[in-house]
Amino acid sequence: MFKSTEHNIERLLDPSDDLSLHVRDLVVSNTRRAYTNFGKLKKISDDFRPGDLEKVIENLHHLQSFSWNIKRPTPEAIIAKLEQRWPDVILSVDAHNHPITDKRSLYSPLLHSLSFCILNHTATVTATSQLEQYSKLPELREVLLRSPNLRKLDIKFEYNWMSRQVEWSGITASPHVLNMPLEPSDRLPPLQELTFSGPPETYEFTLEHCQLWKQCMDWSRLRRLDLGISCPQHFFEHFGNSLTSLKSLAMGVRFGDRHYTHWAQGPLTCDGLLAVENFIRCIPHLHELNITDFSSAFADTFHLIGTRHRTLRKLYYHASINRTQRQHGNPDVVYRCMAREITKLPELRDLTIDFLLLDGRWPIDHAKHIATFSRLNTLRIFVELNSEVSDFAKEYLVDPEEGGHMPPFNVEPAKKVTTDLFKSFFAHNPYSCLTSLEVCFLRHRREDRVQRFEMKSSIRIKRLERDDAPSPLDGGFVVDADGEWLHCDLRTQQTI
């Protein structure tokens, strides 16, 4: 245990110490790092002494939430203490590799947020008939039926498909499906947030399943929905008119791409843009939209965003990052359409997009388009580096079986293009609202990976906002660079 963690626990164990007056959120985690946001959050590692945590819970004065994120069951004494001392606390459980026998926390009336791993990452599945053996979807259904206060659910699929610990051969044409075995009489809690995550997104929205789930749950309460990169037509057709409170949506746009469909019963694709259009048109007041676009209908997609969702504040738009598919369109079309349609979004303040290098070089003309978006506060740009040589890295020679040596990241050219882009916002408009810019360079570890990155290196720029700070054109900003390749999450590109 870090000394800082041990010291803080000792303070929380002392009823006379006023630290306990300021803690609102308590997190128990596997991490060896401990953070204190004084007055807000206390995060402690999992090697506390027996009995200490119950005493800490007893001594706190204003606890609002408790999170259990470690790989062992929540002790009965802790759950009992929470229910007795803090009957209105928000309980969050991360059940990734969590013992499914830990019924005490999963069935607690305090359960508010649940991250639930459906397939164990060490499972080896060689036939679809084995899916039920490894899938925990029946257990998830039982938890939902017993959790009337659950409001946030993250359904994870975290098997290791790249290292072939899971073998999908022979299951494509199987009649088996992978979704919750709902019954017409089931009554599920009215979720406010629902996420499907993991590589690849494999939850199957069959016609029958969509009909049942719509019947079993009040979808009008849902505010955040993350479908990953899926584009499930049956879901779109059945739920659009039900999501009247939805504020945040993440989804894919892909048409008839059987390569990404693992089971015929629940395709990840739509028949065409009309299904996507009809679904998005039904959602009245989106604030955040995250789209991964595998189609060639860039102009139509942007037009739909620009004309329908003028309340949009945050947009993450990723053109297909599959190296073969992303060659289907002229990059100029993407940026021209983006520039035209974003002007129709008066509330947009946060934008994330990807850049295509042109023959290994930074796309100067495209950057000029982006610099005209003067209302943006935050801009993130993702840049995929192929194996070929570029301004930012040497050629990456890959062994198909073993990978290869990752060439070092050329940080100075990356810092220059990022700095030039930041300054160009203020050259175009001295009153630009931009305060933060990040350019994230991504690279595959192996050539056969599809939209899954493993290494990244970022350049981050923050505008100085003190009253006496010089103009950004005169150096009124700070630059931070990773300087090397860092491992990152395969789906979110977050550093790990």
Image (tube, rainbow, N blue to C red):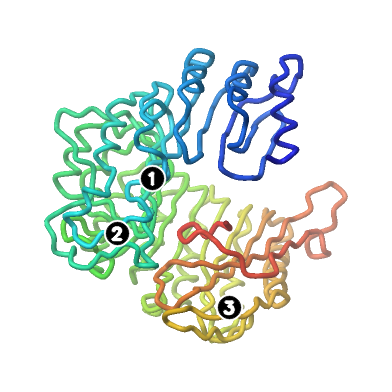
Q: What is the number of callouts on the image?
A: 3
- Judging by the rendered image, the residue that carries numbered circle 2 is 124
Secondary structure beneath disc 2? loop
Secondary structure beneath disc 3? loop
Q: What residue type is labelled 3?
A: Met
Using residue 195 as the reference point, say whether residue 383 is left or right of it.
right
Callout 3 touching callout 2 (CB < 8 Å): no
Q: Position of residue 299 (x, y in %)?
A: 38, 67
Q: Which mark is residue 406?
A: 3
Q: Where is residue 337 in the image (x, y as percent from the top left)?
A: 45, 68
Q: Nearer the viewer, residue 492 or 163?
A: 163
Q: Residue at x 30, y 37 (%)?
A: 140
- Judging by the rendered image, the residue that carries numbered circle 1 is 195
Q: Position of residue 145 (x, y in %)?
A: 27, 28
Name above or below for residue 178 compared with residue 41.
below
Pair 3/1: label in front: 3
